[in-house]
Image: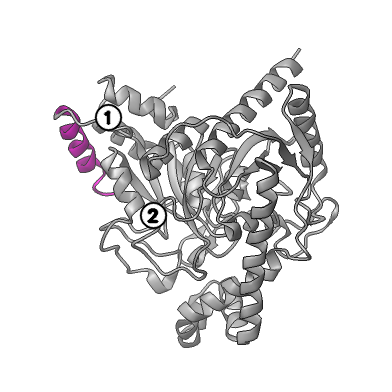
Amino acid sequence: MTLMDLSATALAARVRAGETTPTEVAAAARARADARNPGLNALTVINPSLESEAAEVTERLNAGADLPLAGVPVVIKDNIWVKGLPITQGSRLFASFVAPEDAEAVRRLRVAGALILGIATCSEFACKGVTNTPLHGQTRNPVDPRLTTGGSSGGPVAAVAGGMAPLALGTDAGGSSRRPPAHTGLYGFKPSLDLVPYGPGFDEPVDGISVICPIARTLDDITLAMSVLAGLPPASPLAGKLAWSADFGLGQRLDAELETALDDAIAGLAAQGLPLTQAAPDWEGLDGGAVMPLQHAGLARLHGAAWRAAPDALDPDLAAQIEAGLALSPSAVATARDASARMGEILTAFLTEYSALIVPTTPCPAWPVDQIAPQSIGGAPCAPRAHAAVTPQANHAGCPAITLPFATTRAGLPLGLQLIAARGQDAGLLATAGTLMAMLAQQEQERVP
């Protein structure tokens, strides 16, 4: 196992113990990125100051600093500011923008001793469920490069799953740092709203739903990242009964292999004594489509003038969203805002009855990289945004959610299980996720002859 195959937790422990140096880690990270990024298009830029950052971390260690992420390479999504590096939001409109300062989350990573390996691709303005842009092109899935990573945090997951870094920061306004990890066999954690500081940075199309999220290959690394990003302490698993649902109360179809894997997982967890109840919120007819006008209106507000001036500069899919936003009436936007509030109220109320809710992260595995969405889900044509049906609700409730890699298809494609808890229960949710993963591992061990 090479340095770049270690978890962030293990790598930091080696650096802190003097078994390797930040400079050696930086060299290994750059070599891995140079070798693998061309085939995946995960990174828009590799940090030219990587080696000098490593030298600074070495000096701090020699001075006795306690650095929990000492020498750990981290990649940052292309919509989070990193001082001195080009941050483009995947858009030609920002092709020459250089961040004037670090986002607070990035600053906290640096304080903890992390090295910024580079900037990772995202869909334009982080508003699309696959990662391809006119500026940076297509990002491919390391599990199978013929497939998409999903979006919008496609670059962060491609870099982590592709072994370029053990840890990444993404953003999530509707599942953007849960669905891509599910498609690449990773963990992606959406914290409670405002637990991790969001700025300074770009204006968001929709206020009050987007969060900065750690993405990693291990749950321990997610926990370590959250201790750095938010001072999140260890906690016990959430007490009380857990709910589970295949369709999240939405009537969402699942691909057959995912449905079978979910049924097997639930049966195994129940057999090991986990208190599970099949239940889901009553959404009163609300789904992700009810709140999409907020994104369209926000994009029109931020970028409508630029689109009018140079419509061909934008991703056609984003141009269509902006055009839709410009056509919205104030009453339509108000209706969507009410839907957002009600969606949050419904999920919050449900999570007062249950300690957590288990649902699939996505209803299907990754699909071909040149398609904006799968052609079908569960044997039926894919409705608009059906591949993203079960993630935005947690954003509108402001509550934490995590995707766990729990199974693969016969073709070896990863599948994700989503665990959601009430707002503020982040530490308990991570502990509960650890319990679930240990139980699923035990179930798999017993299955193997």
Q: Relative to residue 343, is residue 433 depicted above or below?
A: above
Q: How is this picture coloured?
A: one colour
Q: Amino acid at mark 1?
A: Glu
The residue located at (35%, 49%) in the rendering is 118
Screen quadrant of the C terminus: top right
Residue that numbered label 1 is attached to:
24
Of circles 1 and 2, the one toward us is 2
- Of the numbered discs 1 and 2, the one sitting upstream in the chain is 1
Alpha-carbon neighbours of circle 2 within 10 Å: few (<14), some, or many (≥20)?
some
Which mark, by number, is residue 197? 2
Left or right of residue 411: residue 149: left
- Give the CA distance from mark 1 to mark 2: 31 Å
Residue 360 appears in the figure: no
Residue 183's mark? Answer: none
- State the image coordinates of residue 431 (x, y, percent, origin top left): 55, 32
Q: Residue 318: say if magenta.
A: no
Judged left or right of residue 355, residue 70 is: left
Label 1 close to label 2 by CB (< 8 Å)? no
Query: Seen from this angle, which residue lies furthest right?
Result: 379
Q: In the rendered image, which quarter is residue 276 located in?
A: top right
Q: Which residues are magenta?
A: 47-62
- At x 57%, y 56%, the residue is 151
Three-letter amino acid code at disc 2? Pro
